Image: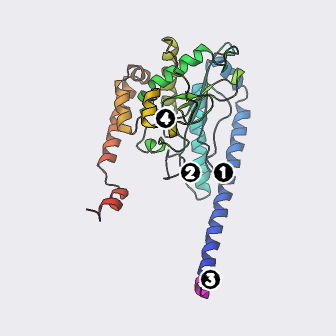
Amino acid sequence: MDKKWMAAIAVLIGILTYLFIGFAHHSSKMSSIVKELQGHLGKWNETLLHRAHQAGTQSSLLGDGREGSPASGGRVWNPHRICWRGQTFKLVVKKIARQHGLHATFMPKPLYGVSGSGMHCHQSLFKDNVNAFYDESDTLGLSKEARHYMAGILKHARAFAAVTNPTVNSYKRLVPGYEAPCYVAWSSSNRSPMIRIPASRGLSTRVEVRNPDPAANPYLALAVMLRAGLDGIKNELALVAPVDRNIYVMSEEELIEEGIPSLPSDLKEALNEMIKSEVISDALGEHARTHLYELKEIEWDMYRTQVHEWERDHYLRLY
């Protein structure tokens, strides 16, 4: 190898090293600032912890947890408060990124081949400072209310997907092989199903709904999930057995045999499911449901009729 090539390779290595160190510096700084922000917000809202226990419903938001995507959450709040915190979090992260000449995105699946960005929703119900989801006599520490609530979530999951996963891009995150779920099931011991039960019990007993993404309007997303869960409690829906194996490696026949449905595969399928559901339609209200459906139909049609780079790469020379 001559000296010119060696010099060129050395320059290239230097540039890549500079870019890597710069990215690591900004990512680390972003995480530290976000943690500081969470600390300030936590101190500012210290008294809300007690109010959250009295509010009846608790929620927290967490992401898929991949490197470079700091999770937001850890405390529990009433639904309105956690929605406000989630929106504030996204706004502050974007503003800090711009100050450093960067762009922060909460796009569900910005890159092919890596995990996307999720908005895992941890939920529990409280009454008189008592977590209604906890039952120490149960083998999993879950009350009948918790089981009925999960049954409602699972029953209406396909119907509320258009709200919790509202973009064309959302469904490129909900594919097998990554951290995001794509099957309607629950478990207390693995992360491939849509609902996971975190290990904490007592006041911290909760269900983690893992399919929502940060493109969702959190106010609408929590409204439809809460309504779905409460429908399960109201009608005492029976909870299916947990799936404690890796669903991603199960065959199509095994999924059918186990009665494990999948979430919608695209936005159009999700919209069709939403419009058929009386429970989700009622949760949204006529105005929100009608306008959401119309706007998302337009988005789907724009995507469906667009010719994408992948198509040109694969078909232009072939045909």
* Residue bounds of the magenta highlight: 1-7
Query: Which is nearer the eye, 278 or 196?
Result: 196
- Residue at the spot 62% in from the left edge and 82% down from the top edge: 7
Residue at the (57%, 43%) spot, across then down: 91
Q: CA distance from mark 4 to mark 3?
A: 52 Å
Question: Hey, which quadrant is residue 293 in on the image?
Answer: top left
**Secondary structure category for the residue under label 2:** loop
What's under tag 2, amino acid-wise? Ala
Mark 1 and mark 4: Cα distance apart in space:
24 Å
Residue topped by disc 2: 104
Quadrant occupied by the C terminus? bottom left
Residue 294 in sight here: yes
Residue type, mark 1 in image:
Met
Cα distance between the residues tagged 2 and 4: 18 Å
Pointer 3: what residue? 7
Q: Secondary structure at mark 3?
A: helix
Residue at screen point 69% across, 53% down: 29
Q: Quadrant of residue 122?
A: top right
Would you say 313 lies left or right of 154 here?
Answer: left
From the viewer's perspective, is residue 142 above or below residue 99? above
As shown in the figure, which amino acid type bears the numbered disc 4?
Asn
Question: Which residue carries the number 1 mark?
Answer: 30
> According to the image, label 4 marks what residue?
217
Q: Amino acid at mark 3?
A: Ala
The residues tagged by marks 2 and 3 sit, at their Cα atoms, a distance apart of 35 Å
**Marked residue nearer the N-terminal end (2 or 4):** 2
